[in-house]
Image: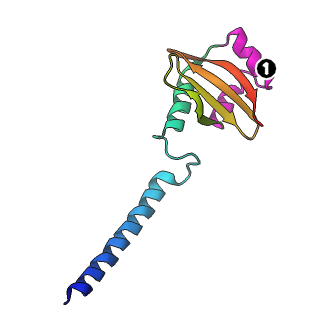
């Protein structure tokens, strides 16, 4: 057998393995995930917010009322929102993230504290 036939055969087997591995990775990680797997930053941020208690101070409630939300609907809103990393400030203390909900054209700046989170500012998206 010449080296060209052996090389071509190995290349085909490599391509087959790469294709099957990619298909398996897609089936395990990407399927049914609109924003990627739960290990990615946006999903971890939303999970971190859900683990905290909402600090219902006067400013937070005013911001929520301004966009037509209340504290009871806030959890569902966070679950359906996306994290906009470019508008967020994750390196400052306390960390602040911008959550946007394109279906409702609203966005919230959420500040994470020790065991609570609060709404800093709400804004309408264009």
**Would you place residue 111 above or below residue 57 in this image?**
below
In the picture, residue 52 is in which quadrant?
top right
* Left or right relative to 10: residue 73: right
Label 1, secondary structure: give it: helix
In the picture, residue 64 is in which quadrant?
top right
Q: Is residue 8 magenta?
A: no
Q: Residue at x 50, y 53 (%)?
A: 30
In the picture, residue 63 is in which quadrant?
top right
* Left or right relative to 94: residue 104: right
Q: Residue at x 58, y 28 (%)?
A: 88
Residues 56 and 119: in front is 119
Magenta segment main secondary structure = helix
Residue interval drawn in magenta: 56-80
- Where is residue 6? Give x, y as percent: 23, 83
Residue farthest to the top, as pictured:
58
Q: Residues within 10 Å of mark 1 (few under 14, many from 20)?
A: few
- Where is residue 77? Give x, y as percent: 69, 32
Q: Residue at x 36, y 72 (%)?
A: 15
Query: What residue is pinned by disc 1?
Result: 65
- Where is residue 38? Give x, y as percent: 49, 41
* Left or right relative to 44: residue 123: right
**Would you place residue 17 above or below residue 100 in this image?**
below
């Amino acid at each position: 057998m010449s080296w060209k036939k052996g090389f071509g055969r190995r290349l085909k087997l490599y391509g087959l393995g790469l294709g099957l591995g990619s298909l398996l990775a897609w089936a395990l990680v990407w399927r049914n995930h609109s924003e990627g797997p739960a290990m990615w930053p946006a999903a971890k941020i939303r999970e971190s917010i859900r683990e905290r208690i909402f600090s219902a101070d006067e400013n937070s409630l005013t911001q929520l009322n301004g966009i037509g939300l209340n504290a009871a609907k806030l959890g569902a809103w966070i679950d359906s929102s996306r994290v906009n990393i470019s508008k967020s400030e994750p390196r400052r203390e306390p960390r602040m993230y911008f959550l946007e909900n394109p279906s409702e054209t609203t966005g919230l700046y959420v500040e994470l504290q020790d065991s609570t989170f609060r709404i800093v500012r709400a804004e309408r998206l264009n």
